[in-house]
Amino acid sequence: MTTTTTETQSPPREKAVGRGIDRVDGPEKTTGTARFAAEFPYPDLAYAALVHATVARGRITGIDVKAAEAVTGVLSVLTHLNAPVLKPAPARSMLDLSTMVSATSVNYLNTDEVHWDGQPVAVVVAESLEAARYGASLVEVTYQEFPAVLDFAAEEANAKPQPSSILGPGSAKKGDAEAALAVAPVSVDLRFTTPPHNHNAIEPHATTAVWDGDRLTVHEGSQAISWMRKHLAVRFGIPERNVRMTSPYVGGGFGGKGSIWPGTILTALAARATGRAVRMMLTREGVYRTVGGRTPSTQRVALGAGQDGRLTALIHTSVTRTGKVGGNSESVTEAARHLYDAENILVQQKLVEMDLLPNTFMRAPGVSIGTFALEAAIDELAGELGVDPIELRMRNEPERNPLDGKRFAHRKLREAYALGAERFGWAERTPEPGSMRDGRWLVGMGVATAYHSSVQFTANVTVRLSADGTVVVRCGFQEMGMGGATAQAQIAADELGVPFEAVRVEYGDSDLPTGPMAGGSAQTASIAASLLSACEKLRGSVLALARRSGDSPLRGQRLAAVEARDGGLYRRDRPDAGESYEAILYRAGRPSVEAAIGSESGLGALAGQIRFMAKFVNDQRRWVKAASGAQFCEVRVDPDTGEVRLSRWLGVFDVGRVINAKTAASQLRGGIVMGIGMALSEETLVDPRNGRVMNPGLGDYHIPVHADIPPIDIHYLDEPDPTMPLGLIGIGEVSITGVAGAIASAVHHATGKRVRDLPITLDKLL
């Protein structure tokens, strides 16, 4: 084969990044061939079901399992009296972010202590799912009950300051906000509440586990494959290399599958105890009782301003809860730290520890409920001032971060509001509450700012280029429906100058190079950073092979002087001079070339984590990085029944560079839908007498359905952030923020009634 040289420049190939490309996993999901955690076949598969505690705090005094063991098909009933020994859960550490996967500190079935109503106290393993669940219903447990802290509202006065952590900052201040508020010409001082929320992914949590000697294989719908793998290795006392986790498809996560909950551990425990492959599929009620959700909150937002609308005081405080045996602090006041240029600022977060199932990550943890209160308060202040709500925001739009003066890495809120106001027809809004009607319906318009910080994790990636021009990208990340594999294929295609169809992405397996957690809107950017480096390294290796030949038009060229396109490398100064990958690799006698970024294990992995933390801290000191946007909504309210109907929605977002136009719009739209549920219907009801969830299922916990959702118009600015890989920021969480605030303001505009306690149900409007 001779060297291939392009004589005339071909028309430029359309870049993959930015296009609206269908997800590569679409055919498998739509045809039913995609295999989820509860669908991996094994011979002699057994099924497991949980027995839940019926007290909030206490000690088991007796367990009667005879009736369960007598059920045909029951293989074993595991309790604290006969379960295999587990190692304690690892303590959380800033140097090892994988410890964040520990949902609780409870050593399940290795203790007779009960820490929340719903905690698993036994596992029934049977030949069939039906036998396992029936057997579980027959297990009788007696308890010695202890006093328990269960009433969030009653415990608010006992809240303690929330310490700073990577999951959420603590308190901060600039000037004397309370004093400035007291003398402000115009002010509002408001109290808001939000209820607990539960996860309701379309795929309830499920685990399939099998042991082969001291080697464990787990199939799990996970947002953190590598972190869960490490956790299981610690709990079962085996080397990490002996644990394999696969998670090729996740039927929704939103944070609820980012931690390791009792079902996963107890499925593996049951498999070890019985010597069988075991599958556990939680019921919807089982998810509510063993998987954490969003914390409730009580918030105070107080704003002081001059007659010109310039903020002189901004106070945002919150009280949230965690469990006594685990839970996450949440950055409820995050947006208040960055959005408005107030002269004096006070943000403060407090926590109450309770004898309840620990809370956990839920889409935009803290920020989603925090922006409800902050943005609704801004709207109220606008009303007091007689100023348009958008104009008030723009008067207080800062040039630098209000608290500490740090530069914004990227901020286009003015542009988002200007575009949104024009497209939505904001100028047609009459400012007086109750002044707009459509027949018998009261009509209201509301706006709010969306905001979510941007972060990156470490990611190990390998890229292999074969002589036929095909590319394989390997990284153990998670695909939860957001199009992660598609986005990384688009990036690799452009970086190596090959068609999108030539790239295959392998993911969802702990045997692959370690990927990042899918959380914090960070997965795409984290992988992209390593993928860009790997592709550059690979181009360098291919160029080195080409330069060895005296006949190559690339001889003597440096990497910066060539570009990847049309399935090969070509000179920038002479676009007609270059050669294909096929020609270069064939001449070198190489079937493929591979490049890797990242260390896999041991001291190398620890060093990589330390480098990541150093970069993270350095970035935090230099920049404020965030996605943002403007939410516009129109509501119609029935004046007789209080029924609220959304009629229009527009979201305009500044999310940096968009990799896939189609999946980005889908992600942004999905976050808005979740925000609509938070605003209008979702509420977990916890009995303050016994800590039991009283509506553990979709029959009583109301999430939005199609009839509740209006047409949602999505726009994004597509302006790259120069401090982020490819300029992308993160999309998954920003669009839920501000949604509830916009709806609350629209409802007030329609009716004149302020609702400061979510959800906004009809009884609060009558």
Image (tube, rainbow, N blue to C red):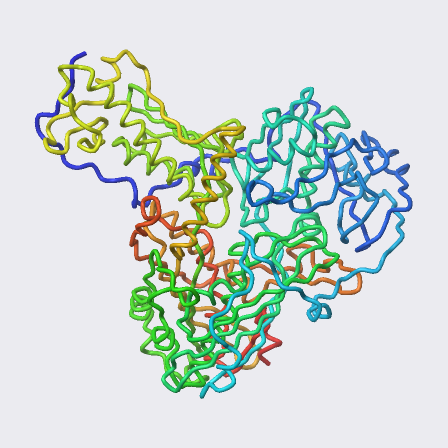
In this rendering, the answer to whether 730 lies above or below 367 is above
Q: Position of residue 128 (x, y in %)?
A: 74, 32
In this rendering, the answer to whether 150 lies above or below 30 is below
Q: Position of residue 188 (x, y in %)?
A: 51, 82
In this rendering, the answer to whether 643 lies above or below 3 is below
For image coordinates 40% across by 57% down, the residue present is 624
Choose between 746 and 176: the one closer to the eye. 176
Residue 746 seen in the figure: no
Choose between 156 and 584: the one closer to the eye. 156
Residue 642 seen in the figure: yes
Q: Residue furthest front?
A: 175
Q: Position of residue 584 (x, y in %)?
A: 23, 18
For image coordinates 38% across by 38% down, the residue present is 486
Q: Position of residue 360 (x, y in %)?
A: 61, 52
Choose between 407 and 280: the one closer to the eye. 407
Q: Is residue 491 left or right of residue 204?
A: left
Choose between 620 and 111: the one closer to the eye. 620
Q: Is residue 67 left or right of residue 652?
A: right
